[in-house]
Each structure stands twice: as structure tokens, then as C-alpha cells.
Image (tube, coloured by chain):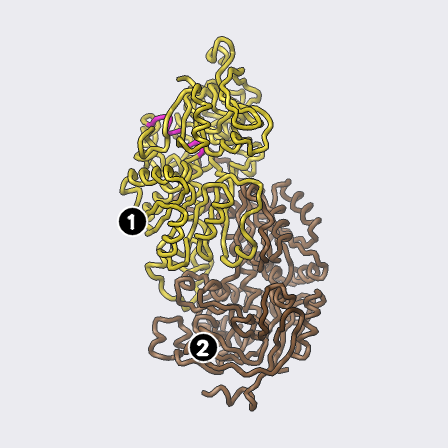
Chain colours: A brown, B yellow
Amino acid sequence: MSANATFSPAGQQKAIRWYPPSYDIRVESIPFPTIQDPDDVIVKVKLAALCGSDLHVYRGHSGIEKDHTCGHEFIGEVIELGSSYGAVSAKGRPALYSNLKVGDKVVSPFTVNCGECHVCRLGYTGRCPEGALFGSPALEGGQAQFIRVPKGGGTLFNLSNPSTWSSGLPQEDRAKALTGFADSSLLLLADILPTGVFAALQALNHPKVAPVITGKPWPLCFSQDVVGLGNEVDFTQEDKLLTIGIVGLGPVGICAAVSILDALSTRQLPYRIVAIDLVESRRDKMKAVYAAVGADGKGNGEFVVCSVEEAKIQVKEWTNGVGCTAVLEIVGHADALALAYDLVRAFGVIVSVGVHGGDLLPLTGRQCYNKNVSLDFGRCPARAMFPLAFDLLVKRQDVFGGVGTEASLIDKIVDFKQAAACYDEFDKNKVGKVIFDPWK
Amino acid sequence: MSANATFSPAGQQKAIRWYPPSYDIRVESIPFPTIQDPDDVIVKVKLAALCGSDLHVYRGHSGIEKDHTCGHEFIGEVIELGSSYGAVSAKGRPALYSNLKVGDKVVSPFTVNCGECHVCRLGYTGRCPEGALFGSPALEGGQAQFIRVPKGGGTLFNLSNPSTWSSGLPQEDRAKALTGFADSSLLLLADILPTGVFAALQALNHPKVAPVITGKPWPLCFSQDVVGLGNEVDFTQEDKLLTIGIVGLGPVGICAAVSILDALSTRQLPYRIVAIDLVESRRDKMKAVYAAVGADGKGNGEFVVCSVEEAKIQVKEWTNGVGCTAVLEIVGHADALALAYDLVRAFGVIVSVGVHGGDLLPLTGRQCYNKNVSLDFGRCPARAMFPLAFDLLVKRQDVFGGVGTEASLIDKIVDFKQAAACYDEFDKNKVGKVIFDPWK
């Protein structure tokens, strides 16, 4: 099909664009995108969200000097496919090259990934060498009416065809979820929900956390090849109790909290969680979300939301000064990382999924040695995380389904005219997660 | 029994002692140790070794201002036990409180650990709150004729009674090994062998390495709870090939290399290893050790020993610029850590077991984010690692059995009179691992 006929008579579309050096957001008419490569897909954007990491560019902290269309979180409908799709050459490539169709509803991870190189095969889709971040000078973003998705067969997640991915849920439940869920809920898959799940998953699967979970001492805990230590002393209840810190309660931090609660309740693991933020409104949101999570997603443990100083006292009291088993650092700031180090125990794990700046890490080599600390950094491989994130989305519609309620992650859905005002409010912490509807 | 009778008529013993501010090693007569606590054990030292980390103190880089007896690697014989041993109260405590006997041959980890607190129960024995480093102002060291071992029932490893620990080896093979092995070989258990095994174990068990080993993409690789991603593309041979860097080829680096080779050959995993050092004599030692390792300890892979610049080219060529799956940093220096970062792939793992100084880590937050790097720091929990290290010692007597040969880790066994000269030679890289015999 010809894309031109369906876009707009003038071949123009509306887009939210950023201009250097900083704080300059404009809604403009720009040409609609066209297929540039056989692997490209053109998507009509239904909704696009504003993300905390957009603020790095907005504030001019990224050193970017080129104007571009903003946004890396979007959901939409396929309206045009490059010539790779359905071609004979699609055999042996990612499944979407064979079965993606015009009209399919798709959500995209925040970066492109080919899905078929060495890096993608290993599941490290966030670092595909073909990758580019949507909403950057390298690749126009999703806060527009239409968007070009390079390597669409590797990048996109086809919400109209749940047979294209595996899940812990029955196929029919997934299909029902896909027709019954609001687009604003499914849009959480683009970034914040998989990133939260990624943080939780890394913490709970780190070998240094394994003794607490398995009840077997290190190194016996994490390898079937490893033999017993002899003369070990039996574990007590204290030894089997996970103490977890979550630093930063923006939308990703809240997703991480819900994800970790889900994992702990599913596996019936006892826990104590301290969820920390400097900002009262974020703490209030976290409290409301926790209250909204059903009993099946909480399991059996303590969950405390508090400020930094309160958290230090709480962890000390809970653990006799030992510290947290793991700390999730969801801020992407040196102060948050330093706090995570303060809170974590010896042989503890810090998982950092935020976008960090160019300063040296705020830790000395001696500090790291002295605490035997482990640190896991980096960007969520969102495409690889989609199936897990989707299952959590389905299980926890009690918190991921709403808009504009006390317990919902999304504050409001607005039209493009409010773009500049929303960036400003978001920057000043006056609003939480905002979604743009390009057709409103 | 009374210790006094067996020590020396004058109640004095010889010891190698360090004096501030730096480079001042003296052999002196000091009082022999006595039981100060019911959990203490007095050990007659048979051999004590000089370790690379002793140089931090020797050079005056540790800020230590108090003279003390040196050395944290020693093997010996129990000559006196505190009242806890064999007491009714020993029930429920670590097994050695019940079955350690005068005359037993023991090796000690380089730090004390009680074996029964929360930290020890989890297996993190190197960070026991009761812990202290032998050969420091807090605790007299093992380069002496006699030594007091606090919390001996938790700390010591009883080489005369192999029923006190588990092993992958049959009990009779272990017993045979214990009577047939030289003390100089068993002394490697005190620090360098478990530390090398610890480095190798952390690298091979990190979740980010799991896709390469299991052939399943992340996050499917490391949790049975996790479901498939759908549309994944089949792994190629390249995807299943581990590329590992080892930075620093002192004795611990060589132990790490032998340990990782053993793990890879046991599990029949294909690999490429680049072993790196600035110093030619260390590279030569590594080459000789590799040549001496039997075919059953090498498996099927490439093993290259080279300089820093050669390593960068080698890894680039092997991996098409992607980088190493994991890098072991065995130096404890910012330059080595920076090199490890350069060599490691995106979603790669750096394991650092060296003692680092007080400088900030030489990595920015952005570097860590951009490579999705994971870092595991810290001191080996040597006591917890002993059973694994012992099995490797038994399997690899071809390299861990000798003294003074081209392929042996130990260069020479000398008397105390040569202490000052040996510290000086070791400091200047003129000699490798030296062992002191206090009775020679």
C-alpha cells in the first residue's frame, strides 16, 4: 500500500520537537516518514509517552546540538511494511519478517535492535550494534503522528499476534488481555515496565543473593557442580530474609517495586523492602500503588516508603547494621549510587538501570573491595524483556491499568498543544507520567 | 597440655616483623603466643608464605603505623586448644570445635572467621564481623614459629581429618592426597588458590555470562521461571564461545587461569583466553604453567599470553571488536580496572579480587551504563572456598605440586635470615612466590 494516501493530504504530520540548546519544545509540521530500507516499518502512533530520561536532552545535559522529534515510548498500528516482510528471504530471520501485517498493533522498545546479530541472539537487545535510540539526532522519535521503525522485524513486539512470543500465561488469556487493555496501559511496555522488571530480575538472580534465596551458603548456592563446605551451621530465619532497597520512586522505580513484589510473592520468599525518594509526591504515589496491589502480588513481608535518612535508620534497625541484600538504584545519579553503597551489605548487590552522566563513579576501589560489592549497570534490553514485562502487566492491571487515579502510573493523556507546558511541569516535578495523543 | 614446654626454653620464638614507615623488615625474638580466649588455637607454623598483598604494608601504602609480625599465609600443626574444644558447648557449633585435635595439620585462611554468625552462615566468611587479617596491627601474622588463631573452630581447615568437609573427590583419594602432598603445595590453600578459584567462579556463574554457557538468550538463560522470548534466532558457534581476559599474572592470576581452564574443560565449554601482564617474567611463568597443565585440565580452546597492547589487538581480532565475555582483574590497581573495561564486551562482566586503594574507580557512570557492565569486587571468602580449592589442588598437582621449577608457582623455600632480602627482591619483581621455613 502507499503510505501517502493515508497520512495527510499535504504529506505533513504533527510532531513534538526539541531545539538546542535547552528547554525549547515546539509542535511542528514535518514530512511524514517513508520506507528507507527493506526492513523498515511505518507505524501510525496511537499514543506516545514522556519519560524521565527525556529530561537529560530537554535540559541540555546531553551535549546534543541537533533538533529532532522527541520520544522513545510509543504504541501504534503498522501502516506500511518494507519489502523484506513476507519475502522468501524472511525464512530464518526473526518471526515478524514472516508474519507482521498492516493493521497489527505494535509496541516498540525505546531502541532499535535487529534481533539477529550476535548481540541480539544472546538477548542483549539494548546493545545491538544496529541500535539507535528513538527521539535522538540519530533517529526521529515517537512523539509524532507517524514514525519509521528501522529493523522492525527485530524491534517491534506484535500485540495483535500473541503466538509470536512465549509466556507463562495461557494463549487465550493473553489474547483477551490484548483486546481488553487500554493502549495507555500497553504503552508501559515501551520502557518503564521492562526496565523495572530488568532491575528486579538482576537483583534476584545475582549469585551473591542466592544464599538468602536458596538457603545454601555461598558458593554451594549457585552451582550444581559445587560441593558442600562441610561443617556449615544451619540457616536461621534471619539468613533467609531478603532486605531490599529501592532508590528512586519515579515510574521505573515503582515498576521495579511491583516487579520485585510479584517475584517474591510468586516464590513465597520473605522480605523487607525500603522504597526511597527525596520527593514527597513520588513517595505518595508509591504508597498508593502498594495499597492497590492485590494480596497475590505482595506475598508476606514488610514494605516501607520513606526518605533517605529514615531509610538508613530503618535498614540499620532491620539488619543489625549489616545492610541490604540488594539495592536497586533507579535514578541515574552519583548521589543515588553513593546512597545505594551506604545501604548495601557486605557481599551485597547494587543494580543500577538509570542513565548516568560523565562523572567518575562516586566509589573508591577500597570501598568496593571492603564491602565485596557487586554492581550491575546499564540499559534494559527492552525487547528481550517484553514477554516477562507483558506477563506482569497482565497480572497487575490493578496498578498498571489506570489513568489519572491516585494509584495509576499515568497522570494524564493530553494533546500536542500541551507539549511544551507538560515538559516544563514534568521537569519541575509538578506532574508524573504524561502521555500524548497525537490525534486528540 | 602446656604449650610452654614445647616452644622454646626461653619462652621466645623467631618472627619476621615489619616496622613503620616502610621497607623495614626485621627478624626478632618475641614471646610465643598463648590462649587468650576459649575459642583460640595455638599452631606451630611449618611454612609461611610471602604474598603480593604484603607489599602494600611493606611499601608503607597502607597507612599502618604499628609494627607487627608479618604474613597471612601459613600451614602448621595444632599444639594447643582453648577450652571450647571438645566441650559440651561445642554441639551445634562448627564441627572443628568437636573434632579438632592436638597434632592435626591445619591450614588457615588469611582472615579469621567465626563460622557461625549470619555472615559466615551465608558463606561470606571473608567479611565475618569477628574477622581480622593475619599479619596486621589487629592480629599477629604467620611468619613466625608459632601463631594464635582466634575462632579456630570456624577459621581453620583440618587437613588431617578430611571427613570434616565435603568434596567432589572420593574420601580415600583425599586422604591419600593429604599424606602425599608437600606442605608447600597445601600452603597454596591459604590465599592464592582459593582467591583464583573465587575469581573464576564468579565470572563463570554471573547471569550475564549465562547465555554463552547455556545457549539460551538472556533472560531465559538463568531462571527456570522465565519463559521463552519467541522469535529468537538460533545460536551459532560464535555465540557459544567464551572469550575471557585475565589481567595480572602473579600467583593469584595464574591460579585463576588454571581454575578457569579446569572449569571449562570439565564442562566441555569452548573458549579463548587472553592472559595479560606488563612483566615478561610473569608472562613466562604463565606460559610454563600452561604448558605443564595436563590435557584433562585444558579442554578445547585457545590460550594466549601477552602484553597489554597485544591483548587489545587479540581480543578485537577474536571478537570482531565486540570484546571479552568476562575479564578477571587480579591486580588491584586502577589501570588494570580501566584495561578490564576496555577489553570487556557490552553486557560483560569484570571480576576484581585485588586489594584496591583509596582512589575513585577509574570509570564514569556513563561508561558503565553504555556497556551494561557488571563488576564484582572484593576479598575471597577463603574458608568457604577451601573445599573447591582443595579439589583443584588435587587435580592439578602438575602445576601446584612443585617448588623451584620453571612451571611451579613457588620459587624457593628459605630460612628467616633471608627475610629482608626476599621482601626486597619480591618488591622489585626479581623473585616470584617465596616461602619461609621458620625451622630451617
- At which x and y percent is residue A368? 55, 44
Label 1 element class: loop
B272, above or below A414, in the image:
above
Horizontal side of residue A331 vs B437, given as left or right: right
The residue positioned 36% from the left and 34% from the top of the image is: B393
Most frequent secondary structure within the magenta stretch: helix
- Of A206 and A221, the residue lying toward us: A206
- Tell me the residue that label 1 is attached to: B300
Horizontal side of residue A92 vs B133, given as left or right: left
- Of B23 and A331, the residue lying toward us: B23
Q: Quadrant of the C terminus of chain B?
A: top left
Identify the amino acid type marked 1.
Asn
Residue B88 at least partly seen: no
Q: Which residues are magenta?
A: B181-191
Horizontal side of residue B56 vs A223, given as left or right: right
Cβ–Cβ under 8 Å for marks 1 and 2: no
Say yes or no: labels 1 and 2 on the same chain.
no
- Tell me the residue that label 2 is attached to: A40
